Image: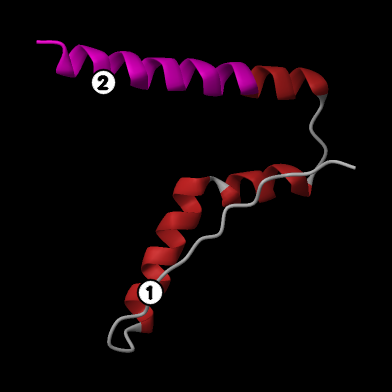
Amino acid sequence: MLLREFSSLEVKVVDNDLERAMKVLKKKIQNDGLFRRLKLKKSYEKPSQYRRRKRRESERRQRIAQAKRAKYSH
């Protein structure tokens, strides 16, 4: 059996402002990558496409990290 760690997303509603709370929740879900994972699970992904996507994601993370290092390494 595969055990996965689930992180709970929690949003506090202040002054009954549900619109603001929903906006915050959507942003947290988007940053967590939940929408992207659900979209990928919706249909079959060929192994070659999976490898290509993983490589592109890795390259993107490396570019972002490199840009951050360059920005703060004065």
Q: Is residue 36 magenta?
A: no
Residue type beneath disc 2: Lys
Question: Image height check: is 53 above or below 15?
Answer: above
Q: Earlier in the sequence, mark 1 or mark 2?
A: 1
Within 10 Å of the Cα at label 2, are there few (<14), some (14-19), or many (20+) other Cα atoms?
few
Residue 28 lies left or right of residue 2; in this view the side is left
Q: Position of residue 51 (x, y in %)?
A: 71, 18
Q: Nearer the viewer, mark 1 or mark 2?
A: 1
- Cβ–Cβ below 8 Å for labels 1 and 2? no
Where does label 1 land, which residue?
12
Q: Is residue 63 magenta?
A: yes
Q: Position of residue 4 (x, y in %)?
A: 73, 44
The range drawn in magenta is 54-74
Q: CA distance from mark 1 to mark 2?
A: 31 Å
Where does label 2 land, which residue?
68
Q: Position of residue 20 (x, y in %)?
A: 32, 75
Question: Image height check: is 23 above or below 48?
Answer: below
Q: Position of residue 39 (x, y in %)?
A: 67, 48
Secondary structure of the residue carrying numbered label 1: loop
Residue type beneath disc 1: Lys
Secondary structure of the residue carrying numbered label 2: helix
